[in-house]
Image (cartoon, coloured by chain):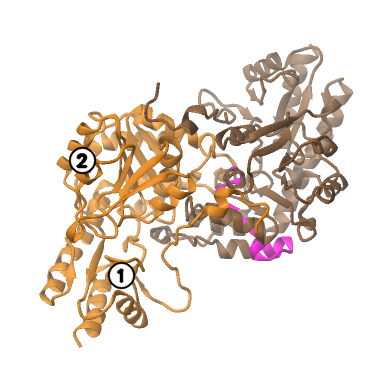
Chain colours: A orange, B brown
Amino acid sequence: MHPFWSQMAEKALPYTPGEQPQDRHYIKLNTNECPYPPTPWLNQLDFAAEDLRLYPDPTAENLRSILAAHTHLNADEVFVGNGSDEILAFTFMALMKTEISHPDISYSFYPVYARLFHLQEHIVPLRKNFELNLEDYDAFEGPVIIANPNAPTGLAVPVKQMTTFLKRHPQRLLIVDEAYVDFGAESMLSYIHQYPNLLVIQTFSKSRALAGARLGFAMGQPHLIEALERVKNSFNSYTISRFTLKAGAMAVLDEEYFQWTRKQIMETRDRLIAELRQHAIEVTDSKTNFLWLRCPQISGQELYQALREKGILVRHFNQPSIENYIRVTIGTKTEMEQFKRKLFEVVLK
Amino acid sequence: MHPFWSQMAEKALPYTPGEQPQDRHYIKLNTNECPYPPTPWLNQLDFAAEDLRLYPDPTAENLRSILAAHTHLNADEVFVGNGSDEILAFTFMALMKTEISHPDISYSFYPVYARLFHLQEHIVPLRKNFELNLEDYDAFEGPVIIANPNAPTGLAVPVKQMTTFLKRHPQRLLIVDEAYVDFGAESMLSYIHQYPNLLVIQTFSKSRALAGARLGFAMGQPHLIEALERVKNSFNSYTISRFTLKAGAMAVLDEEYFQWTRKQIMETRDRLIAELRQHAIEVTDSKTNFLWLRCPQISGQELYQALREKGILVRHFNQPSIENYIRVTIGTKTEMEQFKRKLFEVVLK
């Protein structure tokens, strides 16, 4: 039907990002953005528009050194990309051969990449109550990718389980997508030097409030980072703008503000979870900046729709086994009061 | 040797961008950046750092409409990407099947993509005096990609030759990379509606002085743009930052400044070419923002080195048949006076 399309274009099943509606004002709790602005240091950003005439540093040396110092790694153990999605795409290109294992319920971009790059997929069901157990991946070969904490379930895998997997399968790569790790889970970062088969990916889009700037980073031993660099430099030499390189550096350096932000979000979340549970709403033990919940008296689709009509936008996935859940980003305290009130109007009436 | 690397990582032959030296101050004429700043409107850019907490519009609707109006196309005939290199990469993914033809002397990223995506390459030699003639591509099948004007030769192919090719080969895609088209060549833009097998790619990095912001665009009939969108949305939903989307829109809207910039560069170039020719320096009829020249009395490598020692950075390609040439970006009038003086010191002594 499309004579000029490649097989890749033909077979692609593109990812659907959360909606960005323009029709009215919503309390936007659907794309896990940070409700607080990025570091106020950005208002003093030493940035001249005229610098934009020059290409950015393709090696992002300054930002990588700052990240290396921050994570106690060497600069050649850090890769930066145009959002963690770009890093995931490069990871699929650089570090996957013929197969990939991932949970059945997780970040929905993983199957998109697997399909784009023609990989055999081992889709491993979560256990009861959305528990991810890495023993369930023993049966397969090849790399494993998980989000930890997992999205949209919010649940974290204990570090011990990951180190056990890394030890048990030294020939298999474990990619830990830590997009949400700053909200209460333990990072695998400190195990990089111990495990040559570990790649950790993080983002500036959530805890550092820079979703609009597009920046992510990956950490692993130099042989893994080199593979990412080789693919990146065969794809696009300059993936990160000058503005974003500078904004990212500031976001890492302002540690105090970063700590304040995550603390707000975790406090708001934990208080809200306790309250919702008092009203028989089922909420997981989220270690992320979102809630994953269901209300027995109403379907997920109906709940999504009812909240939308009341001006609250949340995310609903039309996928069997999770179709009765909604994912709700943690907003400001005020926004979450509103959310709670509207939710109760819907489910407690 | 690298047990975790994919074949893609293993076989990649990454592109080498022009050097960005930190050791001393150079007059930087090696990466074809614009010597003038981007539109002064950017200094009044209505941009709040706090907006960065939100994802950008993944469809870049506003920028695409502005570009569509500017090019007299519909928004579904315009694709925007994180620099034209990213668009080229997506084009190779979305619109190439098994083979690709390109000139032997052209943008050196084309063979990098061909290798990355395992395409059979037909590398077609330029004719005498670097002439690109599309008749030489008749012998092959599959898509053709050319840079027009070509880099690093600076020479443009007449539009008639391209339309003849498009008519003669309705089953073959012609991709025209117009990175330098604003400096005096004729664009293929106005033929988009006539030819379903034409894709035109342009950039904000040269004539719009936004190399540091990372922005490029492609134009073609909707079936081609849709293929690019499908691959992009299977790779990275949000490739362009909020800041860059706004900066790009302003750069398109400030038509007067754009015209001023290109006029400066073309004037500087044409005057310089005339002067150099008076001194028996061989310079092509560049329709770009760079010169392609050789001096019979000195090798390209020596010339590059001698200029470097005098504080002038130009680009030299260590490739047979062009090894005696250097590529020199058109800078400001003052910079080019300096260049000329240093060049004469080297070759006329």
Q: Residues within 10 Å of mark 1 (few under 14, many from 20)?
A: some
Q: Nearer the viewer, residue A107 or B318?
A: A107
Residue A88 part of the magenta segment:
no
* Chain on which label 2 sits: A
**Residue highlighted by disc 2:** A162
Left or right: B31 in relation to A218: right
Give the magenta part as a residue range: B66-85
Q: Residue furthest bottom?
A: A349
Residue located farthest toward the left when viewing the structure as drawn: A278
Q: Residues within 10 Å of mark 2 (few under 14, many from 20)?
A: some
State which quarter of the image contains the N terminus of chain A: bottom right
Give coordinates of residue B330: x percent, y percent. Answer: 72, 35
At a point 48% along the width and 60% down the height, the residue shown is B47
Q: How far apart in space, not on screen, are marks 1 and 2 (Cα)?
A: 29 Å
Q: Chain of mark 1?
A: A
Q: Is residue B78 above or below residue B205?
A: below
Which element carries disc 1, helix, strand or loop?
loop
Is residue B80 highlighted in magenta?
yes
The picture places residue A285, in percent across and down from the top left corner, at 16, 60
Percent x, y for residue A296?
20, 77
Instruction: Tell me residue A278's x, y (percent).
Output: 10, 75
Tag 1 and tag 2 share a subunit: yes
Residue at the (63%, 29%) spot, across then down? B27
The kind of residue on which mark 1 rests is Glu
- Please name the residue that numbered disc 1 is placed on: A323
Tell me the number on the disc at residue A155.
Answer: none
State the residue at coordinates (28%, 53%). A180
Q: Which circle, 1 or 2, is nearer the viewer?
A: 1
Disc with the residue nearer the chain's start (1 vs 2): 2
